Image (spheres, helix red, strand yellow):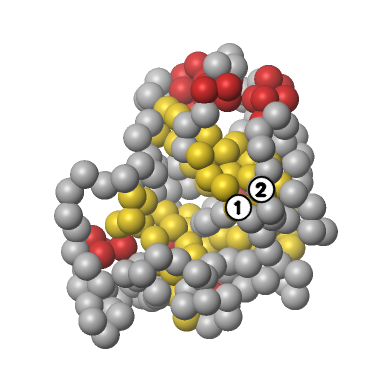
Amino acid sequence: MKVLSVKDAAFRKYGRIVDNVDLTALYAALKETPVPEGVAYEPSVASLEATPCMKALSECTYGEMPIQIGYCNGHNVLLNALEYHRDSEINVAATDAILMLGKLEDVEPDFTYDTSKVEAFLLPAGTAVEVFATTLHYAPCSVDGKAFQVGIVLPKGTNYPLATAHAKVNADGTAPNEDALITATNKWLIGHAEGGLDAGSFLGLKGKNLNVTE
């Protein structure tokens, strides 16, 4: 799979490099977070939020909105799913990582999406990017089989368990409406049949379950 750089002009439709906040302390704190053999995501981590970056990111990248800082760490080479939020997400790379991204506007009216439209971008260690709310994304991928450690900054309360019932996927696997894609607070998910997702997830990704090593 061809991998571009987040510094390439092709990335601009998906996000931007965050260069107006000093994230030195956050990079260091992320290096101390655990790395599993698979993939682990924690939405809010005290050691990361204790850095001065918490206040700076809230003020400068979210216009003083309340935020949370967590991480997504581990080893991964597959797409598996794509998600989106109603707000931008900041990815802070303590190690090299690859992001597989798509555009929300390319999701079909029936909420399916062709994975051939996904593009991959190298997020180098020591780099942070804003991934726009209109960008489809999911877990980062490994570079050369190595572990990745990526900080995930989102509006406070995102990716937590739902408090109310939402629409369910139809018996034939279709989604009755967008509500059926909600799997957590402020999280809409479109999965791949080979992605190993929970039962009841909407499996609307069509085509290959992309592998960054191929």
At x 47%, y 37%, the residue is 43
Above or below, 169 relative to 24: below
Q: Residues within 10 Å of mark 1 (few under 14, many from 20)?
A: some
Q: Nearer the viewer, residue 214 or 65?
A: 214
Q: Report which residue position mark 2 lands on.
A: 36
At x 63%, y 67%, the residue is 78
Relative image position of residue 182 (x, y in whole percent): 30, 57
The Cα atoms of the two marked residues, 1 and 2, are separated by 6 Å
Circle number at residue 135 = none
At x 72%, y 25%, the residue is 28
Q: Amino acid at mark 1?
A: Val
Q: Report which residue position mark 1 lands on.
A: 39
Relative image position of residue 34 (x, y in whole percent): 66, 37
Q: Identify the element where label 1 is drawn.
A: strand
Q: Identify the element where label 2 is drawn.
A: loop
Q: Residue furthest bottom?
A: 172
Quarter of the image with the C terminus in it: bottom right
